[in-house]
Amino acid sequence: MAKFGKEFAKGIILANPVFVLALGLCPTLAISTSIDNALGMTLGVLIVLLGSNIIIALIRNFVPNITRIPIFIVIIATLVTVVNLIFHAYLPATYEALGIYLPLIVVNCIILGRAEAFASKNPVASSIADALGITVGFMLALLMISFIRQVLGTGGLSVFGHDLFSLPGLKDHPIAIFTLPYGAFLVIGLLMGLFRRTGVMKSE
Amino acid sequence: MPAKSTLKNAFPVILLTVVVTVCVSLLTYVDSLTRERISAQEDEAVKAMLDEMFPDMSRYDFQNEIYIIYSDGEQIGYAFLAVGKGYGGDINILVGLNDDTTLKGITIVSQEETPGLGTRITEPSFTDQFAGLDVNQVALSRDGGRIDAITGSTISSSAVVEAVRETALEKIKQIEEEK
């Protein structure tokens, strides 16, 4: 159980997927424009990463080294498509909300990265802990980036249609660059630098 | 033993084949399981949008890519989909026409424009401008039309306007031919 906790906690800070491992930057750049998007993407990653880590940990002893990557990719792509179809058919509201993010997960290298670096070498329980920890780490990173981008880029914060606050002045003249991809690079770069400088996170 | 080493060499290939076969079968199964519900779901979404555009609608027919809208057995209008080439990708637009082929209104079904700029094409302040216009008035004001572009999003605005006008002209021709 202690090991479970350790694998879980590791994903949040020491091996934070965005700021430390620098994995999954492509979807992070694309979707971190609002808190809604951040939470939607997190839900998608949670489902797919949990599924792929479990399946890959289960079959890790049979898979020969030379074909492991194609096998992992086929499994992950299947999982994403199945989740996509099931959501579309049975949870249309969630499907609508997740929009493009669900199919985008297939190119999220966090999934393949964890399959390769962790689940293919560890038992199922640790792989579940790893998936959960990495998802929480991913969520925190996305929330941080989205918060900054949404507030500066739109002059306020609204979550699922509820306006939480808006900044007078900034609301009328938002800094639109933060909603664009280069704004995302700026925010991610500055946060990453800040975390490294203060020694909270170090690259592996 | 040569036979054994052949088997050992072939194992990765066999395993990959098995994995792919299992995955493909699973996908086919899930697809057949969900296909009907998904298309019902999509019909439902279209119906909800048509309902909003034509509050009096009692039923609709779908013929040759055009929705024909009826209210108590009487034909009150048409609707169809238009696709615009936006800044970030395709913009899908549902266009409604009154029975006299003036515009009833438009609804942006899906778009991938820049958040905060191009996405404002979905706001009523932009889409409401189309209601009641004749198709020839559908152009940006700088081109002599009646639609004001969104500041900072000329590409998105003009993509919607072009798509609505071009498609409406085409569909009106089709409707008149079929009459």
Image: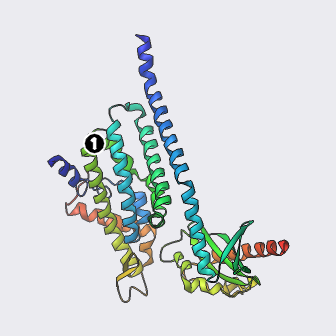
Q: Is residue B7 left or right of residue B54?
A: left
Q: Quadrant of the C terminus of chain B?
A: bottom right
**Residue B86 visible to an observer of this rendering:** no
Q: Is residue A37 above or below residue A73?
A: below
Q: Residues within 10 Å of mark 1 (few under 14, many from 20)?
A: some
Residue B83 rendering spot, x and y as whole percentages: 65, 68
Residue A165 rendering spot, x and y as whole percentages: 33, 84
Please tell me which residue lies in front, A37 or B53.
Answer: B53
Q: Residue at x 40, y 64 (%)?
A: A40
* In the image, farthest residue toward the top: B1
* In the image, farthest residue toward the left: A2
Badge 1 marks a residue whose secondary structure is: helix
Going by the numbered disc 1, the residue's amino acid type is Val
Q: Is residue A73 above or below residue A90?
A: above
Q: Is residue B83 left or right of residue A147?
A: right
Residue A106 rendering spot, x and y as whole percentages: 45, 52
Q: Quadrant of the N terminus of chain B?
A: top left
Q: Is residue B16 left or right of residue B95?
A: left
Residue B40 location, quadrant? bottom right
Residue A102 rendering spot, x and y as whole percentages: 45, 58
Residue B8 location, quadrant? top left
Chain ID at mark 1: A
Q: Is residue B104 left or right of residue A143?
A: right
- Per the image, the residue denoted by label 1 is A124
Please tell me which residue lies in front, B145 or B5.
Answer: B5
Q: Residue at x 74, y 81 (%)?
A: B74
Q: Is residue A89 above or below residue B54?
A: above
